[in-house]
Image (tube, grey):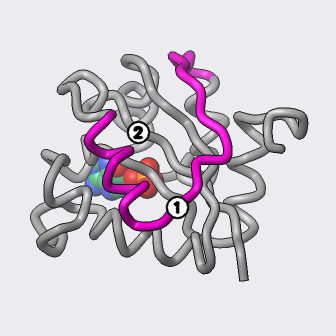
Amino acid sequence: MSQRTFSIIKPDAVKKGDTAAILAEISKAGFKLVAIKKIVLTKQQAEGFYHVHAARPFFGELTDFMSSGVIYPMVLEKDNAIADLRKLMGATDPAKADEGTIRKMFASSIGENAIHGSDAEDTAAFEIGYFFAGYELK
Ligand code: CMP
């Protein structure tokens, strides 16, 4: 069944000039690009997005990084989108990511790992709503 997920091309990948190459991998894998925008988050906006990780020791580092430059938040659609995007991204730590995954190809560390993807339906709904209004999601 067709499903939507949420993704972000992170500041490390944008700075390296890998945005178009990552979008090409996503397109090749059969995802439809429903919506995309270019934005720089404030530290406070990054903290709101990652609130579930607020108690983690890396929260400060994560939110500094995610507010350090341009990101491309986007909404993607295909059958089984949430699980399929996570498979395409590869493991959080690029050193553990399989060959052919986005993180294997474009990420440099567990923190600077090129791409985010929602991990479940409820988080996808929250994350899509955090960045996009209903009228942007036709
Ligand atoms: P993401 O999928 O965006 O969701 C939470 C992020 O926390 C994750 O990607 C990683 O980039 C980051 N993260 C997880 N573990 C660590 C860690 N040990 N140090 C720094 N960042 C981390």
In the image, which residues are magenta? 20-44
**Residue 114 placed where, x, y %?**
29, 44
Task: Indicate which label's residue lies in the foreground, 2 or 1.
Answer: 1
Q: CA distance from mark 2 to mark 1?
A: 15 Å
Determine whether the residue tagged by mark 2 lies in a helix, strand or loop. strand
- x 55%, y 19%: residue: 39
> Where residue 71 sits in the image (x, y, percent)?
45, 27
**In the rendered image, which quarter contains the N terminus?**
bottom right
Corner quadrant of residue 18: top left
Is residue 132 left or right of 111 when viewed as pictured? Answer: right
Q: Label 2 neighbourhood size at 10 Å, few (<14), some (14-19), many (20+)? A: many
The residue labelled by disc 1 is 31
Residue at 63 percent of width and 61 percent of height: 77
The front one of 16 and 118 is 16
Where in the figure is residue 42, as x and y percent of width and height? 56, 16
Which disc, if any, is residue 117? none
Q: Rate crowding at label 1 as few (under 14), some (14 to 19) or many (20 or more) other CA atoms within 10 Å.
A: many
Secondary structure, mark 1, is: loop
Which of 75 and 11 lies nearest the eye of the viewer? Answer: 75
Q: Is residue 90 magenta?
A: no
Q: Is 60 positioned to the left or the right of 121 in the image? A: left
Q: Is mark 2 within 8 Å of ligand 1?
A: no
Is 56 above or below relative to 23? below
Q: To which residue does mark 2 refer?
A: 9
Amino acid at dot 2: Ile
| Front one among 102 and 109 | 102
Q: Are the residues tagged 2 and 1 within 8 Å (C-beta)?
A: no
Residue 59: x %, y % from top left: 44, 42
Q: Residue furthest bottom?
A: 1
Give the residue at x 13% y 45%. 108
Figure quadrant of the C terminus: top right
Q: Earlier in the sequence, mark 2 or mark 1?
A: 2
